[in-house]
Image (cartoon, helix red, strand yellow):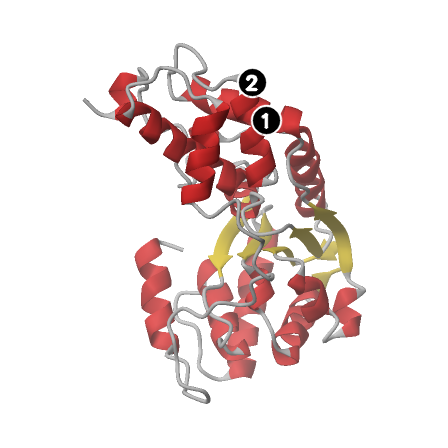
């Protein structure tokens, strides 16, 4: 027997993998999604969603992508996994995502290919939208200038492409590397931590979707979960998953506040908070060492991005 069987669950309720079934439509996530949908539907150009680590940005990015009808949009999600990417590499990835089959190496030729592909998408009656996750890793002025250039591609009625950046608050500083681009942000929204009431609703929602016949956490335990997690969905998941496993080991059908305290201690959640994390590279590299862009391409291709 494992803890799923012990708590009569059909699947893990608190996995941090992006599973659409477990999407929790909190009030603020609903507001954010509505604003993002408005931005792309009206081809506003550049929209921005920011939030701290674990706030649910990637979940919202995938949710937005899933809800864009294929007959109305040519939409793609690009995840930035390394801060050392170049503007040229990024342009090629965007071109590939939007259907350019053999992107040129020469920048002017590549821009021409991309422009003609965007016109083709426009003439088909669809809208080109590119979602950029982990956008705080776009750290150079050159890259920001390229986005500004792409946003200048227009027809009389509208822009030919819209971008939505999902990232940590650092992205605001990166945008200011190119002030004209910062001025082009047509919509911005910041995700806040869940309140205690929303934390409880989130927890109950995930348990219900996992097939739980009842909520094994006491009200005091849920209050502790909110306190230790700070209302961050990713941390809530990790803490709750550990609590369920510990409860299973103790053969306890009820998760109480003391069990949450112990699990939080084991996870280091009761320790003083660490300083905000900065950009984490894909792999450790020597200072000044060249970035292996081909390795990044292979990684993204393997992910199906």
Q: Is residue 158 left or right of residue 296?
A: right
Tell me: residue 244, above or below residue 8: below
Q: Is residue 203 left or right of residue 37?
A: left
Residue 68 seen by the camera: no
Quadrant placement of the C terminus: bottom left
Residue at horizontal 54 percent and vertical 32 percent from the top: 225
Tell me: residue 263, above or below residue 209: below
Q: Position of residue 242 (x, y in %)?
A: 38, 35
**Residue that numbered label 2 is attached to:** 219
How many neighbours does mark 2 have within 10 angstroms: few (below 14), some (14-19), or many (20 or more)? some
Q: Mark 1 and mark 2 in contact? Answer it, CB < 8 Å.
A: yes
- Identify which residue, 16 or 304, lies in the foreground: 16
- Identify which residue, 204 or 275, lies in the foreground: 275
Quadrant placement of the N terminus: top left
Q: Position of residue 86 (x, y in %)?
A: 51, 78
How many neighbours does mark 1 have within 10 angstroms: few (below 14), some (14-19), or many (20 or more)? some
Q: Position of residue 206 (x, y in %)?
A: 46, 25
**Residue that numbered label 1 is attached to:** 223
Tell me: residue 247, above or below residue 52: above
Name the outermost residue toward the top: 213
Name the outermost residue toward the bottom: 288
Q: SS of the residue at dot 1?
A: helix
Q: SS of the residue at dot 2?
A: helix
Disc 1/disc 2 C-alpha distance (Å): 6 Å
Residue 97 seen by the camera: yes
Q: Position of residue 187 (x, y in %)?
A: 76, 50
């Amino acid at each position: 027997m494992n803890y799923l069987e012990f708590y009569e669950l059909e699947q893990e309720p608190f996995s941090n993998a992006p599973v659409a079934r477990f999407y929790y439509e909190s009030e603020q996530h609903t507001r954010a999604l509505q604003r993002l949908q408005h931005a792309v539907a009206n081809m506003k150009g550049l929209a921005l969603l920011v939030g701290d680590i674990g706030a649910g940005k990637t979940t919202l990015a995938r949710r937005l992508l899933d809800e864009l009808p294929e007959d109305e949009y040519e939409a793609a999600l690009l995840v930035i996994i390394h801060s050392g990417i170049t503007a040229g590499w990024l342009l090629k990835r965007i071109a590939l995502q939007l259907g350019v089959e053999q992107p040129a190496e020469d920048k002017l030729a590549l821009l021409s290919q991309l422009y003609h592909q965007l016109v083709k998408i426009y003439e088909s009656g669809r809208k080109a939208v590119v979602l950029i996750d982990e956008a705080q890793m776009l750290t150079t002025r050159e890259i920001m200038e390229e986005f500004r250039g792409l946003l200048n591609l227009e027809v009389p009625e509208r822009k030919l492409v819209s971008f939505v950046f999902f990232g940590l608050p650092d992205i605001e500083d990166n945008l200011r590397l190119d002030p004209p681009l910062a001025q082009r942000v047509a919509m911005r929204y910041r995700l806040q931590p869940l309140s205690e009431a929303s934390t409880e609703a989130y927890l109950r929602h995930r348990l219900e979707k996992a097939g739980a016949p009842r909520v094994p956490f006491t009200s005091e335990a849920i209050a502790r979960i909110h306190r230790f997690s700070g209302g961050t969905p990713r941390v809530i998941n990790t803490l709750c998953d550990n609590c369920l496993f510990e409860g299973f080991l103790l053969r306890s059908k009820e998760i109480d506040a003391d069990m949450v305290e112990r699990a939080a201690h084991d996870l280091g959640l009761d320790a003083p908070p660490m300083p905000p994390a900065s950009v984490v590279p894909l792999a450790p590299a020597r200072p000044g060492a060249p970035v292996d862009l081909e390795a990044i391409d292979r990684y993204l291709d393997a992910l199906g991005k």
